[in-house]
Image: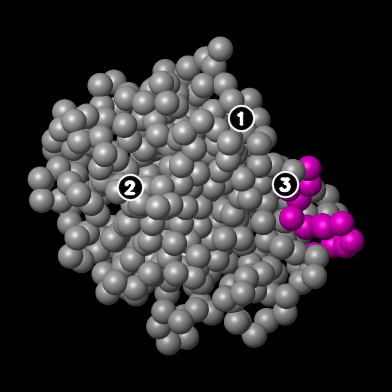
Amino acid sequence: MTTSPHPPLLSPGYRSTVLRAPRQQPILLAPSLSELTGPVLGEGPVVAGDADLSVDGSGEAQGQRIVVHGQVRDAGGRPVADQLVEVWQANAAGRYLHKWDRHDAPLDPHFTGLGRTVTDGQGHYRFVTVKPGAYPWGNHPNAWRPAHIHFSLFGRAFTQRLVTQMYFPDDPLFAYDPIYNSVPEFARDRLVSQFDLSATVESWALGYRFDIVLSGNSATPMETS
Amino acid sequence: MSAGPTPSQTVGPYLSIGLTWAEGPYVVAEDAPGAVWLHGRIRDGAGEPLPDALVETWQADPQGRFHTPGFRGFGRCGTDDDGRWAIRTVKPGPVEGQAPHLVVSVFARGLLHRVVTRLYFADEAEANGGDKVLATVPPERRHTLLAERDDEGYRFDIRLQGDDETVFFDL
Ligand SMILES: [Fe+2]
């Protein structure tokens, strides 16, 4: 028997779950071909330059430049190749480019916070960005989210779809964050990237490694003829 | 870093930065034979609409086949300020003897993991009656999985919690 690494939907410390988490037990579904296949998005939505968030057409973003890379694998350890990876994040000051973000921190004219890329044949991805700042939120008094990057992955099947958040090592805010702590304790460190000297680029950017393992089965890969 | 599956986390309130895709709602072109809008509203346990949610759909083509060249099969639409979403697609064919259906993921601030449901078509009563997945759903809750014909296409509201809570599945 395996224990789920995923957070319970109802995690009252994260207040927004209270009215949004379903209260009925989900019904167990034996996956059919509908669930064991999934979209092959590949390069479709990706535009040149999408993997580098640290520059736009007219200049460089403020902040600590970083390289974030890793390998995407399925539960059997097989690399998930040629699949879309989407990321979004706050800027170095902890502000999102979003109409609802009213945090009193500066926007950055050269930073949108959106990135996209596709895994290579071995399931590897790589982004260049700036380290996001921590930011306050209204969940409880003096609440701050630890610095994080949002990740979205498809895998090879509907069952494998994952949206998660990548954190940075040794963040002192972990102890106070109900979203990070909603994850069962044994699996929390899977959300924390590691400093990676081998991915660090001399005189240019710090490297962080974040490997991702997708749960869920897929059908035998089908050829599209 | 430990091996083992990576835990899910919420998309948070700013999901539209990363998950908006201009082509997302258009699974098929406007002039595709059988093109129809699937649409609805997402509400929470207090009946309030969710302006920060996202619906994704995956489906077979009208012949019940997946990965047909030229047919993306995947739809994505964020909700607007009234919690409304809409995806233009075609009704799928039967898959492995099941009634026509789409598989649906819902993401939102406050959902630490996506929730998964299925969209069936109310006007496929005979096929629905023989569907092995619908058969596992208590009869009094099945209607939450049925999209109803309306002027715009088919309406499929999603209620995350409370009376008439949508049936969600555990994969
Ligand atoms: Fe965030």
Residue carrying label 1: A82
How far, Cα to Cα, is label 1 from label 3?
14 Å
Q: Nearer the viewer, mark 1 or mark 2?
A: 2
- Give SS at disc 1: loop
- Give SS at disc 3: loop
Left or right of A193 on screen, residue A189: left
Residue carrying label 3: A51
Q: Which amino acid does label 3 sit on?
A: Ala
Is residue A60 rendered magenta in the image?
yes
In front here: B152 or A205? B152
Mark found first going from the N terminus, 1 or 3:
3
Which quadrant is home to the N terminus of chain A? top left
Where on the picture, by quarter, is residue A89?
A: bottom right
Residue occupying image coordinates x 55% and y 36%: B28
Res. A157 visible in picture:
no
Q: Residue B149 carries which label?
A: 2
The part of the chain drawn in magenta is A48-61
In front here: B74 or A14? B74
Residue occupying image coordinates x 34% and y 73%: B48
Which quadrant is home to the C terminus of chain A? top right
- Give SS at disc 2: strand
Is residue A24 rendered magenta in the image?
no
Q: Assess mark 1: CB under 8 A from ligand 1?
A: no
Q: What residue type is labelled 2?
A: Arg
- Which subunit holds the residue at mark 2? B
Q: Which amino acid does label 1 sit on?
A: Asp
Is residue B95 shown above or below A195? above
Asked if the residue under mark 2 is in contact with the one under mark 1, i.e. CB atoms within 8 Å, the reply is no
> Which residue is most to the front?
B151
Residue occupying image coordinates x 43% and y 52%: B152
